[in-house]
Amino acid sequence: MDELIVKDSNGNVLKDGDSVTLIKSLKVKGGGVTLKQGTLVKKIRLTDNDEEVDCKVDGMSIVLRTEFLKKR
Protein backbone atom coordinates (compact mmCIF):
# COMPACT_ATOMS: atom_id res chain seq x y z
CA MET A 1 0.00 0.00 0.00
CA ASP A 2 1.52 3.28 -1.10
CA GLU A 3 0.91 6.14 1.28
CA LEU A 4 0.54 9.57 -0.31
CA ILE A 5 3.24 12.01 0.85
CA VAL A 6 2.28 15.68 0.52
CA LYS A 7 4.98 18.35 0.87
CA ASP A 8 4.85 22.14 1.07
CA SER A 9 7.04 24.54 -0.94
CA ASN A 10 9.99 23.96 1.42
CA GLY A 11 9.75 20.16 1.38
CA ASN A 12 8.09 19.79 4.82
CA VAL A 13 5.58 16.93 5.04
CA LEU A 14 1.95 18.06 5.45
CA LYS A 15 -0.75 16.12 7.33
CA ASP A 16 -4.50 16.53 7.85
CA GLY A 17 -5.21 19.33 10.33
CA ASP A 18 -1.93 21.23 9.81
CA SER A 19 -1.83 25.02 9.59
CA VAL A 20 -0.11 26.63 6.60
CA THR A 21 0.73 30.14 5.39
CA LEU A 22 0.41 31.42 1.83
CA ILE A 23 3.76 32.45 0.34
CA LYS A 24 2.17 34.31 -2.60
CA SER A 25 -1.02 36.34 -3.12
CA LEU A 26 -3.55 34.28 -5.08
CA LYS A 27 -6.70 35.23 -6.99
CA VAL A 28 -9.64 32.90 -6.33
CA LYS A 29 -11.35 31.85 -9.57
CA GLY A 30 -15.06 32.58 -9.53
CA GLY A 31 -14.87 34.22 -6.12
CA GLY A 32 -13.64 37.67 -7.05
CA VAL A 33 -11.37 37.55 -3.99
CA THR A 34 -7.60 37.72 -3.61
CA LEU A 35 -5.97 35.78 -0.80
CA LYS A 36 -3.02 37.84 0.40
CA GLN A 37 0.49 36.58 1.03
CA GLY A 38 0.92 35.60 4.68
CA THR A 39 -2.69 34.48 5.14
CA LEU A 40 -2.91 31.71 7.76
CA VAL A 41 -4.95 28.68 6.70
CA LYS A 42 -5.90 26.28 9.51
CA LYS A 43 -7.02 22.65 9.45
CA ILE A 44 -6.09 21.66 5.90
CA ARG A 45 -7.35 18.36 4.48
CA LEU A 46 -5.27 16.26 2.13
CA THR A 47 -6.73 15.19 -1.23
CA ASP A 48 -5.96 12.30 -3.58
CA ASN A 49 -3.56 14.62 -5.43
CA ASP A 50 -0.20 15.20 -3.70
CA GLU A 51 -0.02 18.73 -5.18
CA GLU A 52 -3.31 20.02 -3.71
CA VAL A 53 -4.95 20.47 -0.30
CA ASP A 54 -8.57 21.28 0.55
CA CYS A 55 -9.31 24.01 3.11
CA LYS A 56 -11.66 26.76 4.22
CA VAL A 57 -10.66 30.41 4.00
CA ASP A 58 -13.10 33.18 4.99
CA GLY A 59 -15.99 30.68 4.84
CA MET A 60 -15.13 29.51 1.32
CA SER A 61 -14.11 25.91 0.69
CA ILE A 62 -11.22 26.00 -1.77
CA VAL A 63 -8.38 23.85 -3.09
CA LEU A 64 -4.86 25.27 -2.86
CA ARG A 65 -1.72 24.05 -4.60
CA THR A 66 1.04 22.99 -2.22
CA GLU A 67 3.66 24.99 -4.14
CA PHE A 68 2.15 28.18 -2.64
CA LEU A 69 2.05 26.92 0.97
CA LYS A 70 4.50 26.93 3.88
CA LYS A 71 3.92 24.80 6.99
CA ARG A 72 3.59 26.71 10.28
Image (tube, rainbow, N blue to C red):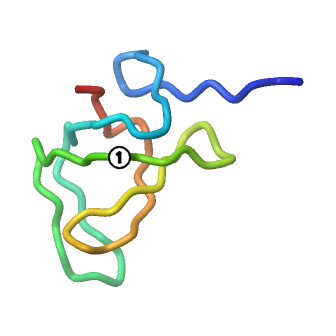
- Residue 6: x and y in percent read 55, 29
Height in image: 60 above or below 54? below
Q: Residue furthest right?
A: 1
Looking at the rendered image, the quarter that the C terminus falls into is top left
Q: Position of residue 2 (x, y in %)?
A: 83, 24
- Front residue (pair 60, 22): 60
- Report the residue at 10% width, 42% height from top: 38
In percent of width and height, residue 27 lies at 24, 66
Per the image, label 1 sits on a secondary structure element best described as loop
The residue shown at (18%, 75%) is 33
Residue 52 drawn above or below residue 15: below
Residue at the top extreme of this rendering: 11
Q: Left or right of 12: which side holds 21?
A: left
Residue at 40% across, 65% down: 62
| Side (left or right) of 12 relative to 1 | left
Q: What residue lies at 55% left-to-right and 40% top-to-bottom?
A: 51
Q: Residues within 10 Å of mark 1 (few under 14, many from 20)?
A: some
- Which amino acid, mark 1? Lys
- The residue that mark 1 highlights is 43
Up-down relation of residue 31 to residue 42 (above or below): below
Question: Residue 16 versus residue 28: which sits nearer the camera?
Answer: 16
Closest to the observer, 47 or 11: 47
- Res 60 quadrant in image: bottom left
Marks counted in the figure total 1
- Whole-percent x and y of residue 34? 16, 67
Where 27 sits versus 3, above or below?
Answer: below
The quarter in which the N terminus is drawn is: top right
On screen, residue 25 versus residue 30, left or right, reads: left
